[in-house]
Amino acid sequence: MAVAEEPRVLIADDHAPTRAMIRRVLEDQGIFVCAEAHDADGAIQAAQDFAPDVAILDVRMPGAGLYAAQVIADQHPDVKILMLTVSDDDADLFAALSARVSGYWLKGEDPLLLPRIVRRIVAGEMIVAGVLLNSIVKDWSDRDFRKRLREHLPREIHLTQKEYEVIELMSEGFNTAEIGKRLFIADVTVRTHIAHVIRKLKVKNREQMLHVLSSPSPKKDFGSN
């Protein structure tokens, strides 16, 4: 039986100690590091010159790691891309997914996992750090909740994203203080969002608001109280 060749890896990060650490961890497990770069342009050129199987790119390196990811993905579609970052910002995560990366990993995670991650993405898996995966799940859950509400909200009623978030937590049984802690806003701000929704729906109180929002009644029934 033929033994599969270890993947060839490009490491691009402007922090030299980080590049050295990643190289050491990978090479200790038999993975060949074919090139290094310290910025986006260097990563793009190295992908052209050394034909890696995997490009490990720092999101925040000079020239923008996401830019390098997009160019490499366009020019070398067979190269798997693993983004490394210290940021758990959802915007960075979703931008990376849009750039067709194969993995998104936080630098704070155990670096000894990197050889396994590299082999898994070469095998065709999509790898996202667990804490970030929760963001993806929550984002789609939030979209589903808002979609259900919009299906029977009158067209003239427009709720803000924060109002949707407050309503969703209310519908799950959380009180004002709990909602404030979860959304990192003051209790008075939670009450203000609730008051705005009550006014927009033309109902009298929170109970009527939740009843209206959870009711499958036709749009014409809104504000009839």
Image (spheres, rainbow, N blue to C red):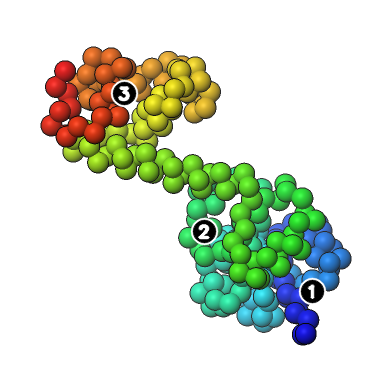
Q: Where 186 falls versus 7 (above or below)?
A: above
Q: Is residue 36 left or right of residue 189?
A: right
Image coordinates for residue 30, horizontal then vertical, percent: 83, 71
User: To which quarter of the image does residue 220 belong?
Assistant: top left
Residue lying at 49% horizontally and 17% vertically, measured from the top left: 177
Residue shown at 15% from the left, 28% from the top: 221
Residue type at the position of mark 1: Phe
Is disc 2 in contact with disc 1, using a CB cutoff of under 8 Å? no
Q: Where is residue 208? Give x, y as percent.
A: 26, 18
Circle 2 sits in a helix, a strand or a loop, which is it?
helix
Q: Quadrant of the N terminus?
A: bottom right
- Crowd tier of the residue under label 3, counting other residues whose Cα lies within 10 Å: few below 14, some 14–19, many 20 or above: some
Residue 106: x and y in percent read 67, 50
Mark identifier at residue 32: 1
Residue matched to label 2: 97
Name which quarter of the figure residue 104 lies in. bottom right
Per the image, the residue denoted by label 3 is 210
* Occupied quadrant, residue 198: top left
Q: Which residue lies at the image location 63% right of the left edge and 47% below the top edge?
A: 130
SS at mark 1 in the image: strand
The location of residue 20, given as percent across then percent down, is 82, 61
Sequence order check: which comes first, mark 1 or mark 3? Answer: 1
Which is more foreground, mark 3 or mark 2? 3
Residue at 66% in and 80% down: 51
Neighbourhood count class around disc 1 (C-alpha, 10 Å): few under 14, some 14–19, many 20 upward: some
> Are the residues at dot 3 and dot 2 in contact (C-beta closer than 8 Å)?
no
**Mark 1 or mark 3, which is nearer to you?**
3
